[in-house]
Image (cartoon, rainbow, N blue to C red):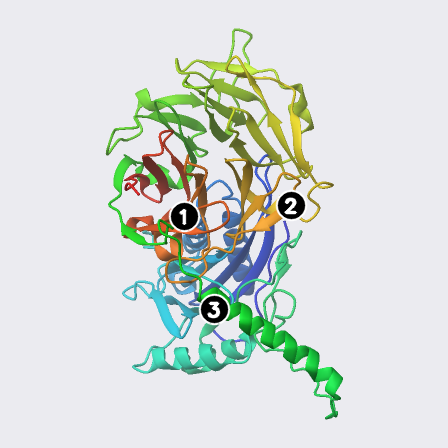
Amino acid sequence: MSVAQPVQRPAALGTPFGAMVTRQLSMWPFAARVARLCLLLDPSMADQALRNGLLRAMQQAYFGSDGYSQTRAVREAALAAHYVLRHHNRDVLPMEQVNAAAVVAAVRGEVAFVALAGHAAAFAWRAGELTGQRGLPRQPRPLGLEQDPVITLWRTPLRDGDRLALVCGATWRPDSQRAIEKILAEAPSTPSAEDQLAEVLGDARPAGVLVVAPASPNPRVPQLRLLAGHDHAEATVDDTPAVPTVPGRQRLSPGRWIVPLLGLILLAMIALATLAIVPQPGALASHVEGVSPRMAIRLGSSADNVVDLAVGDAALYTLDVGEGAVRAFSLDGLEQQPAPETLLARAGMSLDSLGRQLALPVAIEYLPGPRHEPGSLAIVDQSRALVQVGDDRALSEEAMPTSAEWQQLGALGSGATGELLFLDSGARQILAYPALNHALVDTPRLILDASSAPRLPFDQVAQIVSAGESLVLRLDDGSVHRLGANGADQPLALRSADASPLSTSALAADRTGGLYLADPSHASIVQTSLDGTVLREMRAPELAGVRAMDVSLDGHRLYALVDSGVLVVDIPAE
């Protein structure tokens, strides 16, 4: 892995420094994801070699946390600098010891995850409003002390037009917030905003500042990228709009303005006709409902490692990649916790009398049974084995020779007839494995590939759901796409009840031919039809951090994975 070099700033004792890195993460069978890592440090002493080592340790800690949640990954990056400094301080004289403050930010899709240690802060400028979070000021530079530092975690949306400012080593004054608002609103570019903030928030020396703008439309970079100095042109979005050249004034002939005028008249007539349409009686309108989620499973510290859940006929299943385990919980229980009796499968568990063992489970999907018969849970492990778990909790490995041809698991889904949908993002295809007598058989059917859906970004698909006669995909940028029978890609332009765009973090079929979409920016779950019409919106503060969700087979309950555990929501009757 390449090593990020520090952003060049004026040489001074303890000058804050940082780096911005973009990297594509890929570990089979997970699909590739792009993350931007922003690091900013404020050390008490200048030591170029030590600072390079801190950067190396922090980025390795973050990029080595693929299986963790983003909040834990940025926390691990901040703690990596602490452990390096603490080891350094134990081997030197007291006057040579180094302590530091730090801010770490990771941008995935349209969300920024931030970890703050000591005298550090982060601010988000969005739609004319400034929000932010600061570290604990009572320990200005806690990294490197004997006791572990307190890490303050924060998350914020980062969409087009937004700016995220990371600050270390600032001198705070009564008018600092107003100055930050003015600069982030008016600075023509991110380098200009950085220079102005560094001077305004500095004292005898400039403050350390990194300003982050949303990624470009195609931010996927196959190698580690470095942002050095003010060379922002390739790695960040320059906010300065392009100024078109103005041609000389020309005299328009009548034939050149009559056609546009007729077009405007036609559009006006269509608009008036649309406004005059009276809704038919019984038409369903979008409305907002308050719900009261309850804690079905309290996961505690292990919640960071739980990456997926699935709802079956008689149990709720979770996948923990940290302990390499799949657990089964009661559908009706509340405040449940992981216990020996909840363990269903774990890496190293024997699969048969021949000694074959389950490798690290990496994906789960519940396959409904035919008619009213119970279904089974499908587990894919890192060795490409496919294991099914019946209602008797017995594990059985299915013979799948074609699994050797899998390149990269992008997502698993289930069809209406109990088939397993496998999205191979590396081979750019979607396969369906049918079920026979409750067991999957190795005769996959090709649903779509790059030739039938040439515009579909297979490598960006994070989730696949079967709803009615359609397949619905959620991309890692939060957008939702519906696939037609011929592979036609139909992006759904979804908006919340207040008309603002939705950024979806999780997706589930509502069991009636529609969809549920988790929108963390509005702390809500939105129910839509397959054409993108919003039917209703369920809101609660606890829904702001939904990472995965599923719906009970009867469609009456919704289960959502959040940072503290699994919530259950009783879906109100329509």
| Residue closer to the observer: 320 or 144 | 320
Q: Where is residue 106 in the image (x, y as percent from the top left)?
A: 48, 56
Q: Where is residue 313 in the image (x, y as percent from the top left)?
A: 37, 23
Residues at marks 1 and 3 touching, judged by CB atoms closer than 8 Å: no
Quadrant of the rendered structure where residue 376 is? top left
Q: Does dot 3 land on a helix, a strand or a loop?
A: loop
Q: What residue type is labelled 3?
A: Asp
- Which residue in the protein does label 2 denote? 488
> Residue drawn 55% across and 77% down?
189
Structural crowding at the residue carrying mark 1, measured as other residues with C-alpha within 10 Å and reported as few (<14), some (14–19) or many (≥20):
many
Q: Does dot 1 land on a helix, a strand or a loop?
A: strand
Q: Residue 162 carries which label?
A: 3
Q: What residue type is labelled 1?
A: Ala
- Which residue in the protein does label 1 denote? 518
- Please identify the residue farthest to the top as the structure is shown: 353
| 319 left or right, relative to 471 | left
Measure the C-alpha gap from mark 3 to mark 2.
32 Å
Q: Earlier in the sequence, mark 3 or mark 2?
A: 3
Quadrant of the rendered structure where residue 45 is? bottom left
> Compared to 532, does 177 lie above or below?
below
Measure the C-alpha gap from mark 1 to mark 3.
21 Å
